[in-house]
Amino acid sequence: MSTADGPRRVAVLGGGILGVSTAVHLLREGASVVLITEAELASGASGRSLSWLNSAGERATPYHQLRVAGIDRYRTLFAADPTRDWLRFDGGLHWAGTGADQDTVARHAHERAHAYDSVLVSPETVGDHTPGISAEAVGAAAIFNPGEGWVSLPHLIDHLMEEFTARGGELVTNAGAARVLVEEGRAAGVATTGVSFAADDVVVACGPQTPAVVAELGVEIPDASPVSMLVTTAPVEHPVRTVLNTPRAAVRPNPGTTFALDHDWYEESITQAQDGTYSIPEAVVDELAGEAATLLEGRPPLTAASWKIGLKPIPGDGEPVFGELDTVPGCFVAFTHSGATLGLIAGELLAGEIMTGSKHPMLETFRPGRFA
């Protein structure tokens, strides 16, 4: 397949940002790619992600460096067309809960020590850095990170899929559950219900289902994926441009003058039916919208127009999982909580490893073999 028969053939399992990004980067490198997704593109975690582009707070240095590289790739994309309403760099604003001002100050100091652009602000000065924030809602100490941004992953996936199609990629949607085929100890393709796709290499990038897919290969990747929700509001005209990460609501602007809302305090209100679907009382959704409204100057009424609930992919140790399985050569994994921030850079580096056989040093800390 990859010798005299033609270009290297790669099957990518997963229609979220990690799968789509890796598929496009593989096509750029000259591979033949089939992208297989259980349902529709962006129908999983990528369709319900807050998609805050950041490396704020404290984390291990290799993870921080990878996230900063991820933001850099988005800046390159942004520079190509700054008018896009689905990719913006207008900063991020964070403050902690009541009585945690010292934690905020310590976080600011940590960010400054890593040369991460970080400005300590107060209710009185927040308006000097970003518009539309209710000063009464801001904690006594808050952090404004001017270099942060956000992306609407469904829009980004649509954008990347235009290139995917133009480069001759093959897309298979609504394939149902899939598994990795192994021949003579090496990945050899992907099997779905009634259909198999032969390949030289396989990429497993199917969000919270990733640990279960590789478990069938005898590989354990600890999974800490919680159930989460993303709410999209009805359109509302308001000057807020920054992403807000606050004690009771996370808020980001969204295309169409809407807002996307997220947090974790309501997780215990989410229930799962026997068919696997999730639900939450509408009153809880309205409460989240109310919490978000208090953050905005003038407290405009925010109405939840829709909400999506599902698992948020998080590896057991919180660190990303990228790279080839030691026990199943030719099978590569992409599984991380920071799928939005790392979406472009992870696809680029994984594609490079697949096509060259050379491991990239920035992924060395995140190999799946660390769980063996």
Image (tube, rainbow, N blue to C red):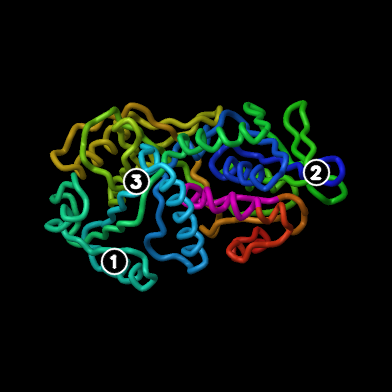
**Residue reaching furthest front?**
80
**Residue at 51 percent of width and 58 percent of height:** 318
Q: Amino acid at mark 1?
A: Asp
Q: CA separation, marks 1 and 2?
A: 50 Å
Say whether disc 3 or disc 2 marks the residue closer to the N-terminus. 2
Say whether disc 3 or disc 1 marks the residue closer to the N-terminus. 1
Front: mark 1 or 2: 2
* Residue 131 - label: none
The 10 Å Cα crowd at callout 1, few under 14, some 14 to 19, many 20 or more, is some
Which secondary structure type mostly characterizes the magenta part of the structure?
Answer: helix
Q: Which residues are magenta?
A: 332-351
Which picture quadrant has residue 24? top right
Q: Amino acid at mark 3?
A: Trp
- Tag 3 near tag 2, CB within 8 Å: no
The quarter of the image holding the N terminus is: top right
* Residue 19, percent from left and from top: 60, 42
Q: Amino acid at mark 2?
A: Ala
All told, the count of numbered labels is 3
The quarter of the image holding the C terminus is: bottom right
- Tag 3 near tag 1, CB within 8 Å: no
* Residue 265 - label: 3
Q: Is residue 55 above or below residue 112?
A: above
Q: CA separation, marks 3 and 1?
A: 20 Å
* Residue 237, percent from left and from top: 22, 32
> Which residue carries the number 1 mark?
103
Say whether disc 1 or disc 2 marks the residue closer to the N-terminus. 1
* Residue 188 - label: 2
* Residue 188, percent from left and from top: 80, 43
